[in-house]
Image (cartoon, grey):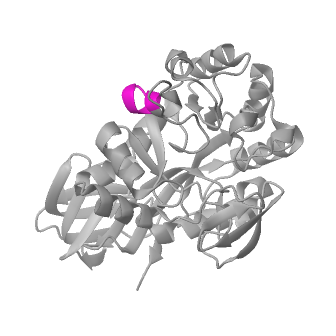
């Protein structure tokens, strides 16, 4: 572990509130919080005019900086883990794409074995996005490789991944989905509704606990058929992912999601692909060419194919649109994700918690990111 870090007179923000206080880290954890803290061996930071938040947790990210989870390569995972702290992300769930069974198996096995190095965002597990999806809501997922939910196949992948698959996005209306979701629930894996043509009734009747990228690739709200969107808004058991890049969803839709669902259930994600952090151009996503320009990241049909959104930009967008509080932003960017994954050491700033921290300006620009006590990014 690196040296201790001391943040003095900093505005500490998490979902429980706001307090101006000193924070001392040691051995990868938060050791003390109080006023007038002194630690002669600690690297000191003057926090006046700065905000200290729990490090962001991105539970739905495919890639960054030229790397993708489906590269199925430890170097690619390391590349992603090194890139994410620049935007304040200290932990992430590596997200796969629909591909052949063999390619998914290889990606899952590689991610399951990966352990983040010091100074990298921590890989928390795997988000299996597909192949148990609806052809009617394929988006940029390749329907050639879609399958009906098969618990035996999932269990095979889970064994390959060392038990590290944490979330599965699926369409609950598919044949066999009820048994599949029950199997996920029994093993502590989150079942998330996404790429789904389910009716409102089917979504509510399912035992899923989560909704993948709200509004995108799901049955939209209609006054005679509220769809998955209506279920996400009205059923309080669902935690709901939101891509707040203002491309995947109109600004008014983002504001509506905040007002109707609330900070207690929303989880900000990026759904970013390998072009994040790079310039405009052509990139690969799950074997398909993606063109990235000012309109976003799109496959040749014009459909959106993930994003190049950063988490700090997502926070600024939501703050500006929803006029929400700093504790609510902390809840949507870390606290809810930590709770969903059952992470007792992350998502808050308190004594004994992991030293996963992001120091920001009042304009929510990232100045410093700390991953498990190690400085992973510094703007200066």
Quarter of the image that includes the C terminus: bottom left
In the rendered image, residue 126, in percent from the top left (x then y), is placed at 64, 43
Note whether 341 is above or below 122 in the view shown.
above
Quadrant of residue 244 within the rendered picture: bottom left
The answer to whether one can see residue 264 in this image is no
Magenta range is: 230-238
| 286 inside magenta stretch | no
In the rendered image, residue 296, in percent from the top left (x then y), is placed at 61, 66
Note whether 36 is above or below 176 in the view shown.
below
Considering every residue shown, the one lying at the far left of the view is 35
Q: Residue at x 31, y 56 (%)?
A: 30
Report whether 266 appears left or right of 245: left
Report whether 125 appears left or right of 75: left
Considering every residue shown, the one lying at the far front of the view is 224
Q: Nearer the viewer, residue 199 or 311?
A: 199
In the rendered image, residue 195, in percent from the top left (x then y), is placed at 65, 37
| 237 inside magenta stretch | yes
């Amino acid at each position: 572990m690196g040296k201790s870090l001391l943040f003095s007179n900093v505005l500490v923000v998490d979902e429980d509130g706001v307090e101006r206080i000193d924070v001392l880290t040691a051995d990868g954890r938060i050791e003390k919080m109080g006023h007038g803290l002194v630690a002669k061996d600690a690297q000191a930071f003057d926090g006046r005019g700065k905000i200290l938040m729990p490090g962001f947790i991105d539970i739905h990210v495919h890639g960054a900086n030229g790397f993708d989870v489906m590269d199925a390569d430890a170097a690619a995972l390391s590349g992603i883990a090194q890139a994410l702290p620049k935007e304040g992300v200290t932990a992430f769930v590596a997200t796969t794409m629909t591909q052949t069974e063999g390619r998914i198996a290889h990606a899952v096995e590689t991610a399951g074995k990966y352990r983040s190095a010091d100074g990298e965002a921590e890989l928390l597990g795997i988000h299996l996005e597909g192949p148990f999806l609806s052809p009617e809501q394929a988006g940029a997922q390749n329907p050639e490789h879609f399958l009906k939910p098969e618990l035996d196949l999932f269990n095979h992948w889970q064994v390959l991944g060392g038990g590290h698959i944490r979330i599965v996005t699926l369409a609950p209306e598919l044949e066999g989905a009820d048994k599949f979701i029950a199997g996920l629930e029994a093993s502590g894996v989150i079942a998330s509704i996404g790429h789904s043509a389910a009716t409102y009734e089917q979504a509510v009747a399912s035992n899923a606990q989560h909704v993948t990228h709200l509004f995108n690739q799901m049955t939209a709200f209609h006054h005679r058929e509220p769809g998955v969107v209506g279920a996400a808004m009205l059923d309080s058991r669902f935690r709901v992912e939101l891509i707040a890049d203002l491309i995947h969803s109109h600004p008014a839709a983002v504001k509506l999601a905040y007002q109707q669902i609330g900070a207690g259930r929303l989880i900000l994600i990026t759904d970013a692909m390998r072009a994040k952090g790079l310039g405009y151009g052509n990139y690969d996503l799950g074997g398909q060419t993606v063109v990235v320009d000012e309109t976003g990241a799109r496959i040749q049909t014009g459909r959106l194919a993930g994003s190049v959104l950063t988490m700090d930009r997502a926070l600024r967008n939501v703050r500006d649109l929803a006029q929400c509080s700093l504790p609510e932003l902390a809840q949507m960017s870390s606290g809810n994700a930590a709770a969903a994954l059952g992470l007792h050491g992350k998502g808050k700033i308190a004594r004994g918690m992991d030293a996963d921290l992001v120091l920001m300006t009042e304009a929510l620009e990232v100045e410093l990111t700390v991953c498990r006590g190690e400085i992973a990014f510094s703007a200066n």
